[in-house]
Image (spheres, grey):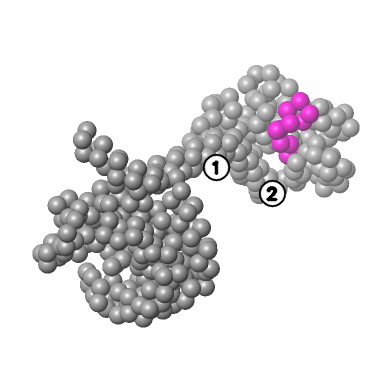
Amino acid sequence: MVYTDLNKQMSSSLNHNNHNQLKLLIIDTDEKLRRRLVDFLSPLQIEILEGAKISEIMKQNQVRNNVLVLAITTPDEKRIQYLRQLKKSIPRMSIVILASPFVSSQLLKSLEDGTIDYICSRNNLASIYSAVKAEISRRLLKQENEYYLKNLTKLKLEHSRHIRKMLELEEIYDTTVENLMTALDLRDVETFGHSRTVSKYSQILAEILGIKNQTILDNIRKGALLHDIGKIAIPDSILKKPGQLTAEEWEKIKLHPVLGFGLIKEMKLLKEVGNIILYHHEKYDGSGYPRGLKNDDIPLEARIFALADALDAITSHRPYRPEKGFLMAREEILKYSGSQFDPLVVKAFSAVEIEHWERIRYETTKLLPSFEEYQQLLKNKSSS
C-alpha cells in the first residue's frame, strides 16, 4: 500500500522533486502488523513503502538520502552492523527501531553512537506515531534551514549590491547638490564660494552644541548647501543689481526662503534641511523673515546657520566693500548676541579659537578660483 501526496508543506516551500521527497519505509516480516502501522501512520501524509526486507524496498524504489526507515525487527549484532553500514552510506537516513523493552536496553549503545535515532515499543502505536512525526518535523526544519543557508550568500550579495547602489546614489545626490549650489554661487557675485563654507561652519557649530547624530549633522550640511536655492527664482536684474534695491525689489529678495522651501519640499528631504532653507533669515529677537519667529521658536539648525552665514558674509569680499578679519567678525557677532543671534550659538562660536575658523575657511575655499579668476569666468560665460 502506497500513500502519495508526500508532505505538501515541504514540497511547496522547498520545491523538491519526487525523487527527493521524504519516504517512510515500514519493514517487518509480519504483514498484518505492517498494514496496521500503514493505516495508523497515514494521517502524516507521507509516502509509505512497506515490505518484509529493507533490501527489497531499496532495490525496487528510488529512495535517496532523505529516507526515513522504520525498522521492525529484533536486532542482533549482524543486523546492527547492517544498519550501521546503511547509515554510513546514506547519512541522512533516520532509523526508528521497534523492539520489546528487553531488546531496547541492548540498543542504547547504538542510540548513543547515532546508528539508530529512535527506539519505540513494538505495540505502542502512539509512541511510534510520535517518533515518526517528530522526525518528519525535524527533517522539514533541517531542510528549510539548508534552503535558507543555501540562499544566504545570494541574499548577502544582493544586500551588498543594494548598499553600494545606495551609496552611489547618495554620492550622486551630494555631488548634484554641491554642483547646483556652485552654479548658484557663480550666478551671484555676493555668494561666491559661500555655500560650501557655511555648510562647514554649521557642522562645526552643531557639534560644539552637542549634536552627535551623524545623520542630523549631514542634514545640516545639506541644508546649508541648499539654503539659497530659492534665489534661482529671483531675476538677475534684481539679484545682480549693482546699486541699492528698491523696496519692491527687496520684498522679492525676501521671498527666496519660501521659494526655496517650495522647490525642495516635494523631494521629501528631512526637516533639518527644510528648516534651514525656510528659516535661515529669521533673527533671534523676531525681526527676521519670512515669519518673524523669535527665540527658540526658530529651529536650532536655522539659528546655527544664521551665525555661520553671517560669519562668512562678514569675512568675504563684496563688490561694495572689502572683507573684514575674523577678529572683527567675532566682535560684530558678539555685539548682536541676543538680537540677531542666539546667545547659546554665539557662546559655542566664541569657544573656538579664531585661528581655527580661519583654517576652516582656508581649507574649504583653497581649491576655488580667486575672485578675479571668478569674474573672468563670468565674462567668458556671458560672451559664449
Q: Which residue is mark 1?
A: 43
Q: Position of residue 126 (x, y in %)?
A: 66, 49
Q: Amino acid at mark 1?
A: Pro
What is the span of residues highlighted in magenta in the rendered image? 87-98
Mark number, residue 185? none
Quarter of the image for residue 83 reads top right
Question: As rendered, which of 341 and 261 lies closer to the eye?
Answer: 341
Q: Amino acid at mark 2?
A: Ser
Quarter of the image for residue 140 reads top right
Determine the CA span between mark 2 and mark 1: 15 Å
Compared to 289, does 96 lie above or below? above
The residue under the point 71% across, 33% down is: 93
Residue 205 among those drawn in magenta: no
Q: Which residue is mark 2?
A: 127
Q: Position of residue 183 (x, y in %)?
A: 30, 45
Question: As rendered, which of 175 and 281 lies closer to the eye?
Answer: 281
Binning the other alpha carbons within 10 Å of mark 2 as few (below 14), some (14 to 19) or many (20 upward) gives some
Q: Please, which residue is most extreme toward the top here? A: 59
